[in-house]
Structures are given as structure tokens and as C-alpha cells.
Amino acid sequence: MTQSLTAGDVPALSITAHCLPEAWEKAVLAVWDNGLAVKTQYDKPDDPPSRDATVMITVANPFNEPRIHKNFPGGPEELEAYRQEVVAGIHDHWIDPAAGKWTYTYHERLFAYTPVENLRDANTPKPFQRVDQIAYIVDALAACDHTRRAQAITWMPTADPKTVDPPCLQRIWCRLARDEQGRFVLNMNTHWRSRDLYKAWFMNAYALTDLQRRIADRLSEKLNSPVRVGRYVDISDSLHIYGSYFRDAQIEIEKMRTTPFVQRSWESSHSAFKSMTEDASQKLDSDPDWYAKAKG
């Protein structure tokens, strides 16, 4: 998992897991135990340095059960709201950088990528048409099932460096392969510039792997052939646990080390998870801002 490093080297860690909650736990433990102590641009004066590493996480099948971690910071309602934000764009209407609001959502960058020069200027020229990059991935793989060009990006080098909160997700890359029976399998990699491991990783991975499933479904229709979800690889240049979270993280890390995994995970069919998720979905159908309003 680790390699011999000299002072000044950022640790490079590799993790493999059967399912998403196992991957999150292994990553938290690996970065906690082996991460570099380093300050961040978001620290308060009294915050201890974060723990940070470059990490590649391979999940054998992101829909293996259990799929849900009971103790990730958040809950089923927030998880459902975030999933819909990424795959369905329910919060794209929050994007209004000229008014000081959000500069992007991942859905907007992936499904309607439009590079500009100045996100904060409502009158900035928009010389390019919107690009649905997910549609491009589907079309590219349908046209050539062994292409290596099926990718989508989020970064706008013309504009994002000037913002205070640029996208963490940088790129999605997809490739089809065939299993022993000759059936198509959709493999997906995601590449991240920077990543909050403790509070964001699980929700990110849950939503992005649902996007992987949706791409597989669209490909299946286009190819008129089954396409199943394959392994998911998650690569972060900076995967970190913020010093401001250490107290909460240590409590959870102690549980990871001392209690059975089954006590901290749910299958997606668990009655409590299903009930809370379905209730959240209905409320979001009526008002996409429901969860944000409820959270205050």
C-alpha cells in the first residue's frame, strides 16, 4: 500500500475494495495512518495540519452490497439530494456566478460544458456551444467499443483558476471491455484535483457510480446489447482529512478499528435506507431545494 519516501514526498497510496463503504473506510485509515501533515488554504489559525496523500482506490463493483455506509457524514436524505444534483442537475439553477452564487455543478460541467473567460461577468463572451460530454461518451463507445477517447472534463483553464472554489472533479474516463461470456462491461475512472476524504468522498463516489450505471444503461440501449457496470477507479491527487475534522474523524476511526464492519454498513435494500431515500426523492420532485431549505 505504501512506498519508501523521503522528506517532502507526498505519499502515494493504492487501495482495493469489494464495495463503496469498505473503500471509504480503507481510504480513511490509510490516509490517517500514512498521510502527509500539511496545511490547507481553508484552515483556521488553530486548526492542526490536514493529513494528505495521492490515492488510487479500486472498487471491484460499486454496486456490490453493502453499498451504503451508515456513518458517513450526512444521511440518506442528503445522499439522495446530492445524487440528483450530479446525475439530474436539480441544482443547476443555483449557478449564477455573476451574482456571487455557485460557479458550477458537476452536472452542468459534464452535461452542458461551456468554457468562458470570466465566470463572474454576466456579459463575458460565450464563443462555444454547450457540449453534452456524457452524450459524447455514449456515442463514442457505441461507435467504437474499444475507443480510449471516451472522456469528459470539468476544468476551464480560462476561468476556474480565478475562482475561490474551483472544481475538485477533473475528468471522467470510460472504457468498454468484454467478460468471459463476451458481454460488455463499462469500466470508469474518475480523476480529482483535490478531495475531502472524510466528508465528501462517499457521497462523490455514490453519485458518480450512479452516473456510471446510467451511462451503461444508455449504451445498452444504443448497442442493443447488455452492458453491466464494471470496476470503478477513483484517483485523487490530494485526498485529505482536514485538521478541523480530526475530533469527529478519530471517533469514527476507532469504530473502524474495533467494531465489525456489518455494524457500520447497510445494503441498499435496507428498509430504513429505502424509506428515507424514497421520502427524500418525493420531496425533491416537488421542490429541488427541499433539502437545502430543511438544512437551513
Image (tube, rainbow, N blue to C red):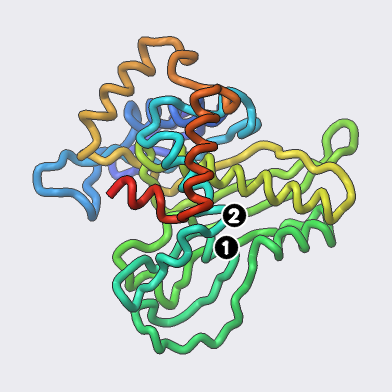
Viewer-side residue, 62 vs 32 = 62
Q: Secondary structure at mark 2?
A: strand
Image position of 179 with respect to 186: above or below? above
| Among the 4 quarters of the image, the one containing residue 66 | top right
* Number of residues whose C-alpha sits closer than 10 Å to that of mark 2, classed few (under 14), some (14–19) or many (20 or more): many
Res. 199 visible in picture = yes
Q: Which mark is residue 172?
A: 2
Residue 182: percent from the left, percent from the top? 89, 37
| Among the 4 quarters of the image, the one containing residue 268 | top right
Image position of 131 with respect to 53: above or below? below
Residue 72: percent from the left, percent from the top? 39, 31
Left or right: residue 192 compared with residue 38: right
Res. 235 visible in picture = no
Which residue is found at the position 29% from the left and 65% from the top? 164
Q: Are marks 2 and 1 in contact (CB under 8 Å)?
A: yes
Q: Which residue is mark 1?
A: 110
Viewer-side residue, 106 vs 55 = 106
Q: Secondary structure at mark 1?
A: helix
